[in-house]
Amino acid sequence: MPLLDPTDTRPVHFVGIAGAGMSGLADLLSRRGAVVQGTDANPDGAPDLIARGIRVSAHDARLVEGVRAVVYSSAVPAAHPELVAARALGVPVIRRAEALGEAVRGGTLVAIAGTHGKTTTTVMTTEALAAAGLAPTGIAGGRVGAWGSNLHAGDNTVFVVEADEYDRSFLALTPTVAVVLNVEADHLDIYDDLADITRTFSQFLQPARAVVLCEDDAGAATLPQDATREVVRYALDLPGSRTVRNARLVARDIVAADGGSRAVVSFDGRETGDLVLRVPGLHNVRNALAALAAGLMVGARLSDMLPGLARFTGVERRFQRLGEHAGVLVVDDYAHHPTELQATIAAARAAYPERRLVVAFQPHLFSRTRDFATEFGEALAQADLVALCDIYPARELPMPGVTSALIAQAMHACGRPPVWEGPQSSCAEALATHVRAGDLVLTVGAGDITRVGPQLLTHLAARA
């Protein structure tokens, strides 16, 4: 493929360049000498790329004329006008997954996979390796404030990337170290069932020299392993837990502290140091163990990596504090699967046990709502109050009978119905009538629910 040919000065064109998975790759190719341009439905949504001098325009099929390749994500339909035009002109049309595989080829590749937690763990791993004296290049699916983008620009020796299972994209990678955080049913518009997902994760592991697995997760722990490669299993030592018996990397004496967590870490039975995190939740302790295990597999010392994790302040839209007004604290989170939602609510309870928990949730995709409505309702029932928005369709068309009312019905069955239901555009105003001083408001979902938190803070300021 022609993406890294230094003799070709024609642009590489990205369709949907502002997307979380696209912007980091576009930035990387630009830093490696390629001329990059792109289009997006929201051209202003890529300020980091624009600041680097990368041209970002509204969608226009004419812009593919004279480019050397067109890169697109799996979310872009095959009939997109820019892809159609490129094919008609004979321009190579390359899926993001294959483009990423080409961009990281030749270096040590740490690929972070799993149904949940990929972005946070990718950033944690990058920060841990940097603290240990390496110069990793990290590409995350979310913007990192400390990086000023989705890309941590290092050298071309070690790469840390998210390995996305959607559309089986991660099979385009050839990882040196393959990390699997968890394996659950999701993306059932792509996969037949959980067995199909598990088989595909097993296929992802095949090229790896070393594998890191979460022993606390049944799906990850039971993936079949080849005896010729090194395997590091990690787990939390919690009351009643038996998974630590098979784990080489263990966190014990875990306590919530200062809005984050502290724990003692041991590797192969030897205590190696204290893990300090500034982000809350047991799921983030597990993410940190995965980062440490991956670092060990590329030769970093555990004690050298711990300070990098202690400095980690999170990823945008991953339990991100937006502000506080009139005693109401507002936090935004990207959770869009029932397990993620449950973990986010548990993290909020641990970090702010004295606050009433108000959750504004926007379901993402009709298919995911259809498949997991009961599980979403059960997770949301753990909050004190819930505002339930209409489904964010993203790439999908409506499905007969599938609305957020399915989740509301599940919440009713749990004895905790939502206090409000309606469009995202009215959610902030509705929340303003329900919240009170001392509340923690979580705005949760993978769609445009992210607008609600700032709008709520504006409403609270106007009311003061």
Image: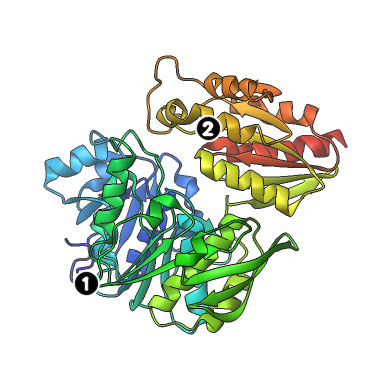
Residue beneath disc 1: 6
Amino acid on which the number 2 mark rests in the picture? Glu
SS class, disc 2 = helix
Q: Position of residue 73 (x, y in %)?
A: 31, 46
**Residue 379 falls in which quadrant of the image?**
top right
Q: How many marks?
A: 2
Q: Position of residue 49 (x, y in %)?
A: 44, 58
Question: Looking at the figure, which quarter contains the C terminus?
Answer: top right
Question: Looking at the figure, which quarter contains the N terminus?
Answer: bottom left
Q: Which mark is residue 375?
A: 2
**Which sits in the foreground, 343 or 331?**
343
Amino acid on which the number 1 mark rests in the picture? Pro
What residue sits 24% from the left and 74% below the top? 106
Q: Position of residue 266 (x, y in %)?
A: 55, 76
* Residue sitting at the far right: 464
Q: In screen coordinates, is 310 left or right of 325?
A: left
Q: How is this picture coloured? A: rainbow
255 over 426 or under it: above or below = below
**Which sits in the foreground, 166 or 10?**
166
Q: Position of residue 412 (x, y in %)?
A: 64, 20
Q: In screen coordinates, is 97 left or right of 234?
A: left
